[in-house]
Image: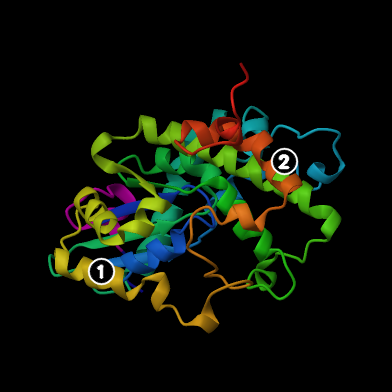
Amino acid sequence: MGTLPAMADDVSSPDTSLTWIFGSSRSGSTWLSRMLGELAGVTVVDDPHLGHHLGVWRPIPLAWATASEVPPLRTLPEIKAEREGYFFNERYRDAWQPALRTLIAERFAAQAAEDEPGPDGRRHVVVKEPGSQAAGLLLDLFPDSNLLFLVRDGRDVIDSWLDAYSEGSWAIEEGAYPVAERGRVPLVEWLATVWVTRMRIVRECFERHDRGRRLLLRYEEMRRDPARVLREIRDTTGLADPDALLEEVAERHAFERTARGERGRGKEIRQARPGGWRRGLDEEEARAASRIMDPTLAELGYETAAAREPVSA
């Protein structure tokens, strides 16, 4: 099996580039990665779940159904970093970090070697990582990689996940479960807390990252003009595809072109309409989401429940 030795040492080499899609699941990242996967020399690593291994949540989701109030959410490395026996202890970072980098790089390189390089001889590895709580560690390992920060209204994210946690949905085979009616609000609170935490972590990473290697993307803007978003990504990551091809790819992957039997309730491709949460969440669920998400929504430029309330005289 071939490898890309340059990736293990320098992902910004002339022969290889590495790009991360960070943010939140159910934000259009699958749609985006499928479009990018059609471009010359691009290998998409779809959901390696590095973040779910390297950024295990504490406490577990059950706490949202049993705690008297919404608990703070952290990851295992945050809690255990100074514990001597913890594998990723800070004291031994010099021992594990280079080995972890090599492990990840070689894994991606093995997959990329199965695809043809682009006409310019370059390979572009695009990693769609839903476990974005580990973005800081992954960017520490690969500081010369590109960062695509994909943002979507978190209430639409929750609405999409609630549909996924329903009988017969696409996600059941991937570890989800049909949530009982009494469990919907605690699930909303858990999902909202996860979304807020991921947005905070990735925003902090984005602000620190090289300006020439980062790009903030909004799902809502991508929905309006996907070809323009693809052009921005091309110009940021060093892809060489012409505008005409980007237009063609965007058109081919338009939501409206998806067969009706492959989209809708219970499907991985559900709906593409921003603001759908207003119909999908009931009043109690919407209030629970707002309590947790409103400050972050406002920071990201989304209208919040508080902004819609009239100001008393």
On the question of residue 110 being in view, the answer is no
Going 27% across and 42% down the picture, which residue do you hit? 213
Which quadrant, please, contains the C terminus?
Answer: top right
Q: Is residue 133 magenta?
A: no
| Disc 1 crowd, CA 10 A, few/some/many (<14, 14-19, 20+) | some
Q: Residue lying at the far top in this picture: please name it.
A: 313
Q: Residue 91's spot in the image, x, y percent?
A: 56, 28
Dot 1 falls on a residue whose secondary structure is: loop
Q: Residue 292's spot in the image, x, y percent?
A: 66, 35
Going 41% across and 37% down the picture, which residue do you hit? 140
Disc number placed over residue 6 in the picture, else none? none
Q: Which residue is mark 2?
A: 288
Dot 2 falls on a residue whose secondary structure is: helix
Going 59% across and 22% down the picture, which residue do you hit? 311
- Identify which residue, 234 or 75, lies in the foreground: 234
| Colour mapping | rainbow
Q: CA distance from mark 1 to mark 2?
A: 41 Å
Q: Earlier in the sequence, mark 1 or mark 2?
A: 1
Q: Quadrant of residue 195?
A: top right
Q: Quadrant of residue 183?
A: bottom right
Task: Look at the picture and state if 197 lies above or below 124.
Answer: above
Name the kind of residue labelled 1 in the image: Leu
Disc number placed over residue 39 in the picture, else none? 1
Residue range (magenta): 4-16
- Identify which residue, 158 or 52, lies in the foreground: 158
